[in-house]
Each structure stands twice: as structure tokens, then as C-alpha cells.
Image (spheres, rainbow, N blue to C red):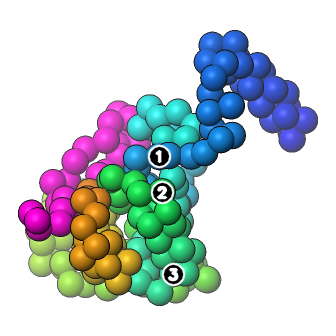
Amino acid sequence: MVEALLRRNATWAEGIARTDPGLFPRLAAQQAPEFFWIGCSDSRVPANVVAGLDPGEVFVHRNVANVVHSSDLNLLSALEFAVEALGVRDIIVCGHYGCGGVRASCENAHHRLVDHWIEPIRRLSVQHAPELDALPSAEARLDRLCEINVRDGVSRVAETPIMRAAWEGGARVRIHGLIYGIRDGLLRNLDCTIAPLPA
Ligand code: CO
């Protein structure tokens, strides 16, 4: 119920005002996050919570299966603002194991609109079929495809004109690929970081 949600919010805000009375006045003056997070809409992977970050510390874009479409105006607008206006230092593309959107891309069933959204993942599953087919179980194939989707997202972000212009202008912002384990709550680095060449 939304009434219960409002009560929880009031309790939370009172708690912050008690334990960190400077937080809301600081955030009201400006936001200066160091991170831009591109993640999945999945309710189990909230950026601030799983990364242990407070309000004001991470600028967030989430969509079904953390897909980086190079023509997604929503993502591109958030990316441009994060890089040019906020000057974030690190961009994180974060997937998660057991992603329902990634799973849907491997199924023959139809899922209406979302099939259009996840089409790039279906394409990745075809491109990487030899590697995926060699894995022992459907779960292992799904989890590997979740990782492949993150790596693809990292390189797609790096190829945007926004990033190329930022790096040409001397920005030191880096792009990382992480994956979150639904079963253990841990973030893993996929070691596919893209950083600007040394000046
Ligand atoms: Co997901």
C-alpha cells in the first residue's frame, strides 16, 4: 500500500536527519556523484543498495536487461549529463546472473514489446553460440550470456560519440563491466574496463 510506503519514507528521512543531519542540506545544494550506473530494472539489483552507496553518490540509468542501445535517447541523455555536467569518474555497466530479460532472449516464446528491446542479446547469443553450447547446463549458458551482454554494453558505451568527445577533450572517465550475483549479493569485476589512452 502506498500509505505504508509513505510511512516508511518518513521514518527513513527522520533517521537520516538524526544520524547525518548534513546530508539533505548538502544534497539540496548540488549532486556530485563519482559513478554512473547502467543496470537492469530488476528489483533485486538496486544500484545504491548493492554498491553500499548513499544518496548523491551514484547517477543511475536502469532498463530491462541493462541493454546499451546506441540509439536509446534515454540512456544517451543520462550518459551525456553524467559525463559532461556531473563529471563522473567511473561508468559501470552492471548485469546480474539469472537475468529474466537475458533468459527471455534465449526462449522461442514471444514476449510482445520486450522482444524488440532484447533483440541485441538474441543476436549476441547467436554470435557466441559455439561457446555457449559447450557449457554444461542451461543455467551456465544463461549466466555466461549475462556476462557477454555486459561486455557488449561496455564497448557500446565506449563507442558513443559522447565518450569519444569526452576522451578527446581530456576526460579521464573509465567504463567498467560488473556482474551481480543474485544468490550471494556480490559484485564481480568482469575485467573489461575501457580507459582513455595515457595523455
Ligand atoms: Co535483469
Residue stretch in magenta? 178-199
The front one of 37 and 171 is: 171
Q: Which residue is mark 2?
A: 86
The label shown at residue 33 is 1
User: Residue sitting at 47 percent across and 46 percent down?
Assistant: 33
> Mark 2 belongs to which amino acid?
Leu
How many other residues sit within 10 Å of disc 2, few (<14), some (14-19) or many (≥20)?
some
Find residue 74 and report its horizontal and vertical position in percent.
57, 74
> Residue 72 colored magenta?
no
Q: Earlier in the sequence, mark 3 or mark 1?
A: 1
197 in the magenta segment: yes
Residue at 35% x, 83% y: name it: 161
- Which SS does the magenta portion mostly show? loop
Q: Nearer the viewer, residue 155 or 106?
A: 155
Quadrant assignment, res 185: top left
Callouts 1 and 2 close, C-beta under 8 Å: yes
27 vs 75, left or right, is: right
Give the residue drawn at x 63%, y 13%: 19
Viewer-nearest of discs 3 and 1:
1
Tag 2–tag 3 contact (CB < 8 Å): no
Kindly identify the amino acid type of the residue bearing the numbered disc 1.
Pro
Query: For numbered disc 1, what is the local secondary structure?
Result: loop
Residue 72's disc is 3
